[in-house]
Image (cartoon, rainbow, N blue to C red):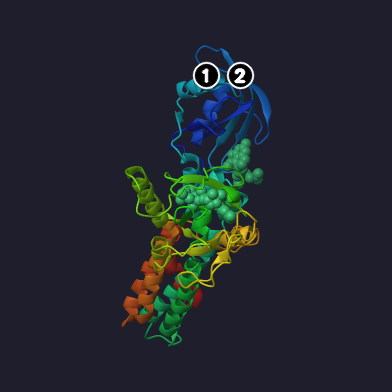
């Protein structure tokens, strides 16, 4: 598959847009690539994988476009697996435009987004989850996101899923053998063993799925909504957590109207804190809209920070949000410098916090961190990171359950095949054909 001569030669700026000291133009694709690079250099190719300082010339006018460092990566030893090259240019816009124009004149075309990595995938250099990991690594804003993305780019999810796929392939091979060679002198409990294996595999996949969404939350960032009655101290808490005066604080109830967002790096997890308008029967139309927005934000958030001022009775509007089933909520008694925190609010023990005295702020960070950060630490076990993974794995689990309870061996095999397809879609690799080889390899049937 490597060095596919039929593919276009593609090029793209690998470095960011805008003025820079150096800009990296990347090229990839088959025989065309070799010719394009040679023509641009007006002669022989540089030695493979070594930086060479070369003059780049326009193929038609002959004008020198830049003095560049040129790297030549003959396939398959390149990022894409095809012949590839890098031109390390002076980073000015006119240099970049001139080289791009020359490349087009030589028959190359601008790459589509993700096309280099797509080719790497097509050439079998990485699986789909590793390709996603590379995209996430480029988007990573915190150390936690970086660690997770790098693990995935290096194939941690691929290894896990391909391991499961290989096991499933074996189970299917057993089941197929039980059907195919029922009359021969094979062990008779093969079908039974396949079902047991399916149950064990299902439990493992289910445990991997039951992670509270930590990988997805780390990838996407965690949304925290601060809610509570007017004057509960929401804006004061936001400011204390982010360490700057992001929101206006005043003794007047109904100060905050818009949703005020502030970003926080909490132990490597990117967190968006949203301060919202105090919940009450609004005084005017603007406040009413603010409260609508507060409620919407509360619905979308991963976790609610529900504030109740310790010197007031808990308000019904906030209590109603706290008591929703299935919501992650941290109940906070605020202003504990004014009055002691009550034992329970809405049936939960509140965390006592005072922005004035600083009480409970560290504990609050800890609690948020505990919710957010599993997966962000260097030694964390590998977690799924996208809804795509969750959907495919859930489907595999459902098929495995079918396989366990299938009334006929043929139906069990069919369900195992469907589970394998679901896993195969995840990595983009596992093919059902492998099963045939497996049947014979595993049982040495030799007929
Ligand atoms: N200049 C430059 N820096 C870069 C990249 C790049 O493409 N160019 N990368 C791009 O994302 C990342 C590094 N990843 C890379 C992964 C594989 C290969 C590669 O050529 N692999 C070959 C040869 C390996 C070897 O040295 O032996 C291979 O695996 O066969 C290159 C870069 C980050 N830094
Ligand atoms: N004593 C004391 N006062 C506090 C504390 N936190 C906030 N306050 C005061 O309580 C008042 C309201 O604070 P805000 O942070 O504006 O309250 P809010 O919940 O954002 O209010 P709205 O935006 O109107 O919904 C201000 O006068 C703050 O200084 C605290 O921990 N202790
Ligand atoms: Mg406020």
**x 57%, y 42%: residue:** 245
Question: Crowding near pointer 1: few (<14 within 10 Å), some, many (20+)?
Answer: some
User: How many angstroms separate mark 1 from mark 2 (CA)?
Assistant: 9 Å
**If you read the primary sequence from the N terminus, does the residue marked by circle 1 or circle 2 appear first?**
2
Q: Which residue is mark 2?
A: 66
Q: Mark on residue 98? A: 1
Are discs 1 and 2 less than 8 Å apart at CB?
yes
In the visual, does 373 lie left or right of 399? Answer: right
Residue 332 location (% of width, % of height): 53, 62
Q: Is residue 289 left or right of residue 328?
A: left
> Does residue 429 appear anywhere in the picture?
no
Q: Position of residue 342 (x, y in %)?
A: 54, 69
Secondary-structure class at tag 1: helix
Residue ID at (54%, 67%): 350
Name the one closer to the observer, 261 or 109.
261
Q: Is mark 1 within 8 Å of ligand 1?
A: no
Q: Quadrant of residue 335?
A: bottom right
For label 2, the crowd category at 10 Å Cα-Cα, with few meaning under 14, some 14 to 19 and many 20 or more, is some
Residue 104 higher or lower than 359, as above or below:
above
Marker disc for residue 173:
none
Q: Name the residue nearer the viewer: 266 or 386.
A: 266
Which quadrant is home to the C terminus? bottom left
Picture layout, residue 107 above or below residue 243: above
Q: Position of residue 133 (x, y in %)?
A: 53, 51
439 or 382: which is nearer to us? 382
Residue drawn at 46 percent across, 34 percent down: 111
334 or 426: nearer the viewer: 334
Expressed as whole percent of the image width and height from the top left, the position of residue 73 reads 60, 37
On screen, residue 43 versus residue 385, left or right, reads right
Q: Is residue 396 above or below residue 150?
A: below
């Amino acid at each position: 598959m490597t060095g596919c001569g039929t593919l276009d030669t593609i090029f793209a700026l690998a470095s960011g847009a805008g003025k820079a000291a150096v800009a990296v133009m990347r090229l990839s694709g088959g025989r065309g690539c070799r010719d394009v690079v040679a023509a641009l250099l007006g002669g022989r190719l540089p030695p493979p994988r070594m930086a060479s300082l070369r003059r780049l010339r326009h193929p038609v006018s002959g004008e020198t476009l830049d003095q560049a460092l040129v790297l030549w990566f003959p396939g398959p030893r390149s990022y894409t697996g095809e012949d590839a090259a890098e031109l390390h240019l002076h980073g000015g816009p006119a240099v970049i435009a001139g080289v791009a124009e020359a490349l087009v004149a030589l028959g190359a075309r601008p790459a589509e987004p993700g096309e280099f990595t797509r080719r790497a995938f097509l050439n079998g250099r990485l699986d789909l989850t590793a390709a996603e990991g590379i995209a996430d690594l480029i988007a990573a804003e915190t150390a936690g996101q970086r660690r997770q993305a790098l693990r995935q780019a290096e194939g941690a999810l691929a290894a896990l899923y391909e391991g499961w796929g290989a096991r499933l392939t074996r189970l299917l091979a057993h089941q197929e053998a039980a059907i195919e060679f029922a009359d021969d002198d094979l062990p008779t409990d093969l079908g039974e063993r396949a079902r047991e294996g399916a149950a064990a595999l299902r439990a493992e996949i289910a445990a991997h799925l039951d992670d509270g969404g930590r990988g997805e939350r780390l990838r996407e960032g965690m949304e925290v909504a601060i809610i509570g009655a007017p004057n509960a101290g929401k804006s004061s808490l936001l400011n204390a957590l982010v360490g700057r005066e992001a929101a206006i604080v005043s003794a007047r109830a109904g100060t905050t109207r818009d949703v005020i967002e502030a970003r926080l790096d909490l132990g490597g997890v990117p967190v968006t804190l949203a301060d919202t308008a105090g919940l009450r029967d609004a005084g005017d139309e603007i406040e009413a809209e603010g409260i609508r927005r507060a409620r919407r934000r509360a619905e979308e958030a991963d976790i609610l920070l529900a504030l109740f001022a310790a010197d007031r009775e808990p308000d019904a509007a906030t209590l109603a949000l706290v008591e929703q089933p299935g919501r992650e909520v941290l109940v906070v008694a605020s202003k504990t410098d004014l009055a002691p925190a009550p034992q329970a609010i809405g049936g939960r023990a509140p965390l006592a916090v005072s922005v004035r005295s600083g009480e409970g702020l560290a504990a609050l960070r800890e609690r948020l961190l505990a919710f957010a950060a599993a997966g962000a630490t260097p030694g964390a076990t590998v977690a799924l990171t996208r809804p795509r993974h969750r959907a495919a794995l859930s489907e595999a689990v459902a098929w495995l359950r079918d396989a366990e309870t299938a009334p006929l061996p043929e139906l069990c095999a069919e369900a195992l095949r469907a589970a394998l397809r679901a896993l195969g879609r995840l990595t983009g690799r596992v093919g059902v054909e492998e099963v045939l080889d497996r049947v014979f390899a595993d049982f040495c049937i030799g007929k």
